[in-house]
Image (cartoon, coloured by chain):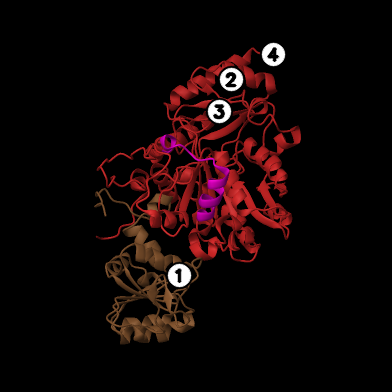
Amino acid sequence: MNLAPYQQPDIIRQTLTRLRIAIVGLSANDLRASNFVGRYLLRNGYDVVPVNPRETSILGRKSYASLSDIPGPVDTVDVFRHPDAVPDIARDAVAIGASCLWLQYGVISQEGADIATTAGLAVVIDRCMKIEHARYLGRMHWLGFNTGRITARRAKLV
Amino acid sequence: MSDREFGFATRTVHAGSRPDPATGARALPIYQTTSYVFEDTDSAAAYFNLQEYGNTYSRIMNPTVAAFEERVANLDGGAGAVAFASGLAAQSAALFTLLRPGDHVVASSALYGGTITQFKHVLGKLSVELDFVDPDSLDAWRAAIRAETKLLFAETIGNPGCNVLDIEQVAAIAHEHECPLMLDNTFATPYLCRPLDWGADIVVYSATKFLGGHGTSLGGVVVDSGDFNWSNGRFPVIADPSPAYHGLAFHETFGMYGYLMKLRAETLRDLGAAISPFNAFLLAQGIETLPLRMRQHVANAQAVAEFLQTQAGVSRVGYPGLPDNPHHALAGKYLPEGAGAVFCFDLPGGREHGMKFIEALSLFSHLANVGDAKSLVIHPASTTHRQLGDAELTAAGISPGTVRISVGIEDASDLIWDLQEGLNALENAP
């Protein structure tokens, strides 16, 4: 599937301005990638809501069995699940009124993308929220990674 | 804010170096510090656990060094880069990160003498087996690969024989066997060739040479494409939970950044060959003029090679920019802007004439380096390649009368005058 329409920098940057993020498939194991991402987003001011039916609490936050169990509005649904699980998650994301469906590295689902896009959600696929935050707003450049960012503007100190 | 694909020259000046947010300094600040104050204990833990991008200690990362690293990674189109104290340090760390005892490496036989020595002796001490192959023979590459082979290694432009590697073909052979292809791109720089675009997986540089460009500072850098699948079952050293990092599985956790994270957080941390911030500053500044310098280097090299080819006192000129060179077609494909600025020519009078020629020069500097703005000359058989036996010399394309030059950015007519003086000195020599 052509991922370019789902990796647009302006959509990624816009999504990163919205603070309440439900992470579906967030692991309680602090060596797993999803745990790294959740911890990073929490440290950087996001309201992270774990969605994992096998846990009651992850990273000190209450864990919910499904998106529909989360009280209050959710901005972004960030997915660390097998691609086969994405269409149902996309339907749930639409049902709770989320504004973006974000699929992490390797979580590629055309059907899920179509469900969310049709309902008017922004969709990002095969990108990592931690890396994109670090690229545009954070410190990815401190470790010699190629952010692709070229600017002569002075950044504001956070 | 619109997103633009900036051109190469713009990126040489800007990539990795934004205005300093703390002070507004426009030039790259030199962060001459060993260590960094943590905001609080949670932050310190997050940095050491690699859960947050943070500075801990300058043996592992430094903001000035990071700007240099990002600049090179950007120019090569890589996921990122890690810098080291020298080119050989970068190369040994790049190898150390992906190899373990019992593995096997297939390398070009036409490599820089220091690399051949490093591979033979250091890899041997680590119980890694090694075979050298003729880089021009795709069959030789294929035939040397075996079950334990974990890496193919070559130079984009061989030093000093100027073998131009058929990168696309050798990368395909490597990938058929689920091995990465690592290239030393020192002679080409990303201005002349971007090996990752042709399928190479990792690029290493001696930044001491054309990247820095002025012969002031040692440095090396490793660039990774981020595309190689280290979880293919053949690289447990990268894919499996690491005992050196409390069980972290680098490829699974960091994905396309896994190799680079391991290279920095383990290999650089543990082997310790960190580059100084001041050297990184000078190298990053050098890169700002890379396109300007490389254009002049290759134009001068072409002019000098064409001059030498007309001289009766020169028996062979090994510059791929010359139409009769065996690597001319590959140079046209991989090095369309020019075939580099380091090459050899042979004096039929052998060792005696090689030394006499060098002594008659007054503008070329006689020293053991390449890639300076100044033109340089050396006699490999008695210097850079003197550790090699006759058979290895021949395999590297060197004879006793071979002279290697690194053509600088002076006026080409002055360089040709100096070389003419050197040739004149041989006319009446025994």
Which residue type does callout 1 highlight? Ser
Marks 4 and 1, how far apart at CA = 75 Å
Vertically, is B201 above or below B305? below
Q: Is residue B402 left or right of residue B373?
A: right
Kindly identify which chain the residue marked by label 2 belongs to.
B
Question: Do the residues indicated by labels 3 and 2 lie within the same chain of the protein?
Answer: yes
Specify which label sits upstream in the sequence, 4 or 2: 2
Majority secondary structure of the magenta segment? helix
Specify which label sits upstream in the sequence, 3 or 2: 3
Kindly identify which chain the residue marked by label 3 belongs to.
B
Residues at circles 3 and 2 in contact by the CB criterion of under 8 Å = no
Colour assigned to chain B in the rendering is red
Res B160 → quadrant? top right
Q: Mark on residue B300?
A: none
Instruction: Please give the letter of the chain rendered in brown.
Output: A
Kindly identify which chain the residue marked by label 1 belongs to.
A
Q: Mark on residue B430?
A: 4
Residue B383 in percent (x, y) is at 64, 26
Residue A97 in percent (x, y) is at 28, 83
Question: Do the residues indicated by labels 4 and 2 lie within the same chain of the protein?
Answer: yes
Vertically, is B186 above or below A71? above
Marks 3 and 2, how far apart at CA = 15 Å
Badge 2 density bin: few <14, some 14–19, many ≥20, Cα 10 Å: many
Specify which label sits upstream in the sequence, 3 or 4: 3
State which mark lies toward you, 4 or 2: 2
Which residue type does callout 3 highlight? Leu
Q: Mark on residue A34?
A: 1
Is residue B164 visible from the viewing direction of this image?
Answer: no
